[in-house]
């Protein structure tokens, strides 16, 4: 029996079995995206609050679409228009949302740990849609699903993550998740973004400074966005980054044949990734988007839809007694 | 509560003969196999639909398409069933548009499963016709749903359960009537 999942706050504390369960549960929702009629009534009458205290386009749209396709309604709170701008505290804003009686809350916040803070105080499921430099669990889940679908497994694969690992919650969640599945992880980027000690985040993680060495034997490569707002501290020139770390077609050839290229988006062509790679046959970026919907539908179904995430019983009871 | 077996409703041989008859009835009442397709409802409707298709192929030479539908997302009791049921994939590799569909399930009881299955099918397209084939009709309907093809009608009480065992899923093959009795 699986440990019941009440919230999704991060990957670090999940077991391999819980993660596998979520990935497996995404499969029917992947198939659902191909239906001509993409509307279920499964969460009819439920409301999901989308509290995005930090700007987000793709993650917010993905959660909103996932909720809509399950039949749930959404309440939207966005950074630009929120009362936060007027000086309200996070907890006051959240309590106001809670008073409108949503059935679950999806939160993105620039402070690490904000979702945990809220989960400790609210009696409803909380889904972390990215908190500070801590975790972005749904991104890691959709990345794992994308890799597992294409490669047929995760165990024993070699993964390289390129870019600003230190400030990336995407990288952290991915490292936590994939290392639980025996993936060998190589981190590569400018030293100030891949400082010594980062390899101790999880087992099977190593740091490599030259991109050529990092790409050798890679089965999958996650290219992180260069957060241009961080380029000035401590200074690295854009040209220098491109020269040293851009994923180009020539560099991709160093990886294993058929190595996958993933990017959490938004992608800056010509900076961290060459356009030919971004649009090439090894690129999975659009699969990632579709898989994100499936993962988020599966999570909302299990967290908001009812009670628990549990393993299927070894043998189902005759269904005329359970199903009807 | 304890579950006791009251009597056997069908033996393995009887299940086999019933499916033979149902396969012939389906083809006869459909006026052939054109556009015909079977949809097995998870779980025990799935092996039943596969066996029916095999039988039809044996006597008509036509391989009719078979799909699988999972009704979990279409249930009307999700908030009351306790642990959230695990969702499975539908496996319907053909277009249901303009198809003559026969939903196949083991037991027809309240009719809610079949309502859910029809909802699921409508999300995939617009079938020409949908009919229902069940191994056992045990009564106690809560919705206006009736089967076109029925293996066996059984009178039951509310507390009784019809257990269908199929060798593909359960290892053994029989249909039994069991009852819940207080300890």
Image (cartoon, coloured by chain):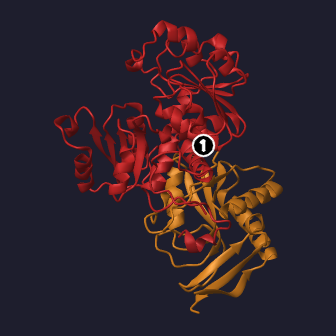
Chain colours: A red, B orange
x 47%, y 44%: residue = A296
x 52%, y 53%: residue = B120
Q: How far across and down, in percent of the image, does residue A179 sit?
A: 63, 40
| Label 1: few (<14), some (14–19) or many (≥20) C-alpha neighbours in 10 Å | few
Horizontal side of A155 relative to A166 (left or right) equals right
Asked whether the viewer can see residue B57, the reply is yes
Q: Is residue A169 above or below residue A247?
A: below
> Extreme bottom residue here?
B183
Element on which disc 1 rests? loop
Q: Is residue B70 above or below residue A211?
A: below
Quarter of the figure with the C terminus of chain B = bottom right
Residue B107's image quarter?
Answer: bottom right
The one nearer the camera, A288 or A204, is A204
Q: How far across and down, in percent of the image, does residue A141 sit?
A: 54, 41
Quarter of the figure with the N terminus of chain B = bottom right
The one nearer the camera, A70 or A231, is A231
Horizontal side of A24 relative to A269 (left or right) equals right
Asked whether the viewer can see residue A36, the reply is no
The residue singled out by tag 1 in the image is B95
x 52%, y 40%: residue = A33
Residue A107's image quarter?
Answer: top left
């Amino acid at each position: 029996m699986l440990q019941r999942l009440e919230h999704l706050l991060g990957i670090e504390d999940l077991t391999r079995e819980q993660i596998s369960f979520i990935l497996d549960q995404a499969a029917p929702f992947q198939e659902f995206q191909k239906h001509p009629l993409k509307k279920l009534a499964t969460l009819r009458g439920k409301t999901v609050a989308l509290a995005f205290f930090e700007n987000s386009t793709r993650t917010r749209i993905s959660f909103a679409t996932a909720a809509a396709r399950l039949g749930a309604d959404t309440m939207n709170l966005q950074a630009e228009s929120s009362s936060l701008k007027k000086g309200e505290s996070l907890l006051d804003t959240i309590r106001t949302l809670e008073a409108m009686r949503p059935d679950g809350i999806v939160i993105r916040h620039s402070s690490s740990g904000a979702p945990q803070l809220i989960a400790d105080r609210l009696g409803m499921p909380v889904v972390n849609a990215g908190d500070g430099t801590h975790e972005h669990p749904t991104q890691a889940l959709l990345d794992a699903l994308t890799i597992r679908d294409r490669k047929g497994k995760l165990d024993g694969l070699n993964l390289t993550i390129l870019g600003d690992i230190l400030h990336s919650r995407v990288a952290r969640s991915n490292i936590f998740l994939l290392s639980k599945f025996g993936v060998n992880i190589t981190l590569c980027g400018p030293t100030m973004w891949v400082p010594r000690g980062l390899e101790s985040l999880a087992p099977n993680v190593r740091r490599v400074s030259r991109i050529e060495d990092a790409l050798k034997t890679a089965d999958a490569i996650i290219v992180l966005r260069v957060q241009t707002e961080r380029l000035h501290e401590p200074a690295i020139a854009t040209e220098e980054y491109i020269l040293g770390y851009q994923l180009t077609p020539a560099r991709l050839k160093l990886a294993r044949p058929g190595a996958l290229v993933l990017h959490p988006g938004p992608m800056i062509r010509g900076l961290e990734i060459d356009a030919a790679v971004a649009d090439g046959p090894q690129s999975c970026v659009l699969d990632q988007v579709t898989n994100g919907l499936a993962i988020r539908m599966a999570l909302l179904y299990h967290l908001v839809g009812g009670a628990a995430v549990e393993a299927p019983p070894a043998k189902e009871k005759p269904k005329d007694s359970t199903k009807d | 509560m304890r579950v006791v077996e009251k009597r056997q409703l069908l033996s393995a041989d009887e299940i086999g003969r019933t499916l033979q008859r149902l396969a012939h009835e389906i083809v006869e009442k459909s006026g052939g196999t054109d556009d015909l397709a079977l949809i097995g409802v998870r779980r025990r409707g799935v092996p039943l639909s596969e066996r029916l298709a095999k039988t039809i192929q044996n006597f008509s030479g036509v391989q009719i398409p078979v799909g699988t539908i999972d009704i979990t997302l279409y249930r009307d009791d999700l908030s009351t069933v306790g642990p959230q049921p695990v969702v499975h994939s539908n496996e319907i590799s053909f277009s249901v548009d303009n198809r003559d569909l026969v939903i196949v399930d083991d037991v027809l009881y309240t009719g809610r499963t079949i309502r859910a299955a029809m909802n699921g099918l409508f999300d995939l397209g617009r079938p020409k016709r949908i009919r229902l084939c069940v191994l056992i009709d045990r009564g106690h309907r809560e919705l206006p749903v009736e089967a076109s093809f029925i293996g066996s009608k059984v009178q039951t009480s509310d507390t009784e359960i019809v257990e269908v065992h199929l060798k593909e899923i359960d290892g053994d093959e029989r249909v039994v009537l069991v009852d819940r009795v207080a300890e």
